[in-house]
Amino acid sequence: MKKIIFLVLIFPVLFSGCLNGLDNYDAPDGGISGTVLDAETGQPVPLPVQGSTGVIINLFEQNTDATQSVDFYAKYDGTYENTRVFNGDYRIVVNGPFVAPCEEAVNVKGQTVCDLKAMPYARIEATASVSAGGGVTVRYSVHTTNPSYKVTEVYGYWNFAPGVDNGAANYAGKVTVTETAGEIAFNLADNATYKDNHYKIQANGNRIYVRIGAMTEGNINYSAVLTVEV
């Protein structure tokens, strides 16, 4: 019986000691943010939605014993942010729908801004309009950044939320074509998915979100996400 009491008494002491050891680590004292810019135009490169289809920012700490990178997702508008990073020197590597990975060295000191430069396979321009019958038409043009690059498919998407890309969970409707310029129309008035979820659209100020994607050399580049009031 005495042994049992002894164990019960000592266990809280050991557990408390472990917690105190964990609490002794310093909190991150810096952060990093910026935009992935087109290396030629200087404009933000639209990216997939953060998540399973998203573009990951890899931070490799330099001049330390760190063996693992700090990884987090870029946003679909081309921006990225991590407000909890330790101050120090880092190598940033970003693999996305780019001709080559973009890479940069940065010294993080407090909240630090570092824009990155990358070359997309294609640039996509798009505009959207609403017809009287409740449809949405997206006019688009796809321009490859190298004449030798081949565009195999072009996609038009619409969704209830502003996160729109080729992931099955990130669009409510999708149309596939092969023309690199033209129009893609969504006949929402006769669309079952639109009808079944009309209450969501009304609750969001009658707004939906549309986007164009283009498969070029096996990589999908995107237009900016367009907000449409239907």
Image (cartoon, grey):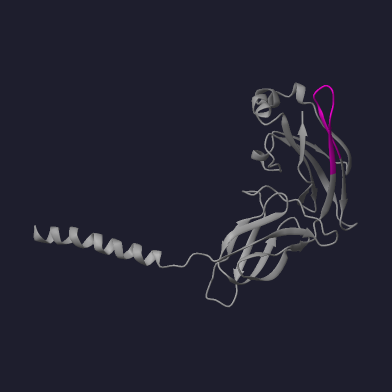
> Residue 189: image x %, image y %?
76, 22
The verdict on residue 133 being magenta is: yes
Rendered residue at 60%/58% (across/down)? 82
Q: Residue furthest bottom?
A: 63
Rendered residue at 71%/57% (across/down)? 96
**Front position in the image: 31 or 1:** 31
**Front position in the image: 164 or 79:** 79
User: Where 217 sits versus 213, above or below?
Assistant: below
Badge count: 0
> What type of secondary structure mainly makes up the magenta span?
strand
Q: In screen coordinates, is 25 left or right of 140?
A: left
Q: In screen coordinates, is 155 left or right of 32?
A: right
User: Where 131 sits versus 12, above or below?
Assistant: above
Rendered residue at 79%/26% (across/down)? 187
Rendered residue at 67%/37% (across/down)? 161
> Residue 90: image x %, image y %?
63, 71
Q: Quadrant of residue 11?
A: bottom left
Quadrant of image for the C terminus: top right
**Front position in the image: 116 or 103:** 116
> Residue 214: image x %, image y %?
80, 46
Q: Quadrant of residue 8?
A: bottom left
Q: Residue furthest front?
A: 110
Q: Quadrant of residue 62?
A: bottom right
Quadrant of image for the N terminus: bottom left
Q: Which residues are magenta?
A: 126-139
The verdict on residue 219 being magenta is: no
> Residue 205: image x %, image y %?
70, 30
User: Where 95 sits versus 164, above or below?
Assistant: below
